[in-house]
């Protein structure tokens, strides 16, 4: 039986400890050859062209070029299978939107790495990378297929990947009723389920379509068409009741804008 050629892997990350972490994890995998390590975006472009890796672990934020800029610079059809690596969830969302095979949010555990790596190896063995690369470059060039058209046509977030127990579930933004803050985390409320992501409310507010979502309080972002009633308490506090029956507080400095959206005449009474 003929032995398969080793999977050629390039690591591009400006943090030495992050590169070593990937080296250590890859050393446990069978039939893998690390063909290079680089610490900036420009070097990543050069290494991809010269070394022709099968798989790249690509840091999103690097000196010279970001991970997405590296993908753009490499060119149509030349980008190998890519797993983006990032320390920030909002960069991970962008990576997901440009059709990376997967992404890793630092610090990631061994199980999460193995899931991403095995998915990449499987796609490489099934020769699915060319299709994915075409999708990636189509998105970057603005001529994306129907499956990605919604995500970039408006420029606003259309889906949110949620990681739990080593698995990634994609939540469509249109399914979200409201988002609540919980310390450094945000809770996505979808029907009777709640999904937790490590993301700041400010970052989410900036990425969501303001015609569809409104931040009614520092700890709440609501999908506007899920609001049923604006409530005024005798003490002067405000709240909304959603169609599901959920009640959420409204900050006083957000009430007037919310009333205008709801078409209430004359603003506050």
Image (cartoon, rainbow, N blue to C red):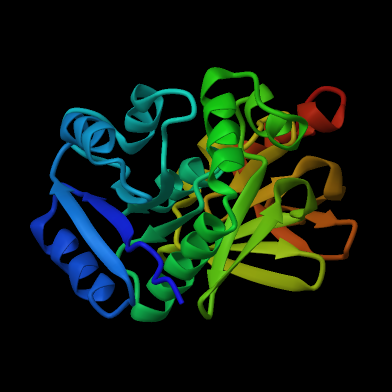
Using the rendered image of the protein, determine whether residue 183 is visible from the camera's viewpoint. yes
Q: Percent position (x, y) of residue 244?
A: 88, 63
- Which of 257/161 is in front? 161
Residue 182 horizontal side relative to residue 68, left or right: right
Q: In which quarter of the image is residue 75?
A: top left
Which residue is at a point 74% across and 54% down the rendered structure image?
176
Q: Quadrant of residue 38?
A: top left
Can you say whether 111 is above or below 75 in the image? below
Residue 48 horizontal side relative to residue 184, left or right: left
Can you say whether 156 is above or below 109 in the image? above
Residue 267 horizontal side relative to residue 115, left or right: right
Find the residue positioned furthest to the front. Answer: 1
Using the rendered image of the protein, determine whether residue 229 is visible from the camera's viewpoint. no
Which residue is at a point 61% across and 52% down the rendered structure image?
160
Which residue is at a point 11% across and 63% down the rendered structure image?
17
Q: Percent position (x, y) of residue 207?
A: 55, 36
Find the residue positioned furthest to the left. Answer: 16
- Which of 142/202 is in front? 142
Which residue is at a point 46% across and 77% down the rendered structure image?
1
- Which of 72/17 is in front? 72
Residue 269 horizontal side relative to residue 130, left or right: right
């Amino acid at each position: 039986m003929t032995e398969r050629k080793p999977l050629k892997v390039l690591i591009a990350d400006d943090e030495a400890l992050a590169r070593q972490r990937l080296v250590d994890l890859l050393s446990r995998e069978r039939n893998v050859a690390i063909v290079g390590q680089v610490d900036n975006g420009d070097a990543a472009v050069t290494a991809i062209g010269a070394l022709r890796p099968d798989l790249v672990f690509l840091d999103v934020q690097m000196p010279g070029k970001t991970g997405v800029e590296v993908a753009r610079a490499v060119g149509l059809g030349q980008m190998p299978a890519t797993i983006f690596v990032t320390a920030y969830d909002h960069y991970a969302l962008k990576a997901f939107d440009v059709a990376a095979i997967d992404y890793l949010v630092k610090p990631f555990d061994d199980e999460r790495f193995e899931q991403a790596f095995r998915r990449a190896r499987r796609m490489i063995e099934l020769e699915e990378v060319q299709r994915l690369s075409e999708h990636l470059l189509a998105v970057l060039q603005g001529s994306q297929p129907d499956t990605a058209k919604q995500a970039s046509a408006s420029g606003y977030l259309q889906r949110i990947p949620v990681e739990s127990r080593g698995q990634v579930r994609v939540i469509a933004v249109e399914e979200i009723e409201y988002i609540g803050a919980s310390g450094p985390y945000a809770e996505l409320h979808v029907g009777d389920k709640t999904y937790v992501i490590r993301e700041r409310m400010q970052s989410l507010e900036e990425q969501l379509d303001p015609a569809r979502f409104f931040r009614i309080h520092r700890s709440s972002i609501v999908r506007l068409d899920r609001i049923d009633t604006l409530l005024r308490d005798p003490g002067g506090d405000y709240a909304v009741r959603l169609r599901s029956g959920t009640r959420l507080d409204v900050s006083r400095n957000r009430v007037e804008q919310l009333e205008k959206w709801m078409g209430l005449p004359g603003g506050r009474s």
